[in-house]
Amino acid sequence: MAKILYIEDNALNMRLVRKLLNSAGYTMLEATNGMDGVKLAEREKPDLILMDMNLPDIDGIEATRRLKASAELCAIPIIALTANAMYGDRERFLGSGCDGYIAKPIARHELFDTISTLLKQTLV
């Protein structure tokens, strides 16, 4: 099963996603800030990354830019998983390099559909 890195500073959100991913058989890696998330991605090379956009050190946009700038990591799909759901946020995050966008609160079916779609695209 796929290895998914979740970069999230909120413990409750982390717990919810961990529960969902574990129930579906995914292996989940966890980082609580952008810098640690980038380092963990470099070390573990996950199959997909879930990225909170509001992080305490570098924000999700900067973390995404760093990941997409790496020749080793640029093909890893990144899903913006964020409470930022105002008009234009989706386009802004997709324009910054994210491959998908999910607004919080997280809907289980939307999370799994987006993960499945992006993982299938990377296998082609």
Image: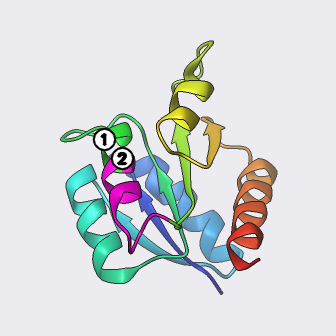
Task: Tell me where residue 39 appears, x and y as whole percent.
Answer: 23, 68
Toward the viewer: 108 or 86?
86
Task: Tell me where residue 36 appears, x and y as whole percent.
Answer: 22, 61
Residue at which label 2 appears: 65
Task: Tell me where residue 62 appears, x and y as whole percent.
Answer: 30, 41
In the rendered structure, find residue 108 and report the number of the disc placed on it: none
- Residue 76 colored magenta? no
Tell me what residue is drawn at x 53 percent, y 67 percent: 75
> Callout 2, which amino acid?
Arg
Say if 80 sits above or below 6 in the image.
Answer: above
Q: Residue furthest front?
A: 71
Q: Which span of residues is magenta-colored?
A: 64-74
Question: Image check: 112 left or right of 84?
Answer: right
Residue 101: image quadrant is top right
Tell me what residue is drawn at x 77 percent, y 77 percent: 124
Say if 107 sits above or below 95 in the image.
Answer: below
Residue 44: image quadrant is bottom left
- Residue 67 colored magenta? yes
Question: Image check: 76 left or right of 36?
Answer: right
Q: Residue furthest top?
A: 87
Say if 27 sits above or below 34 in the image.
Answer: below
Residue 17: image quadrant is bottom right
* Residue 33 visible, this angle: no
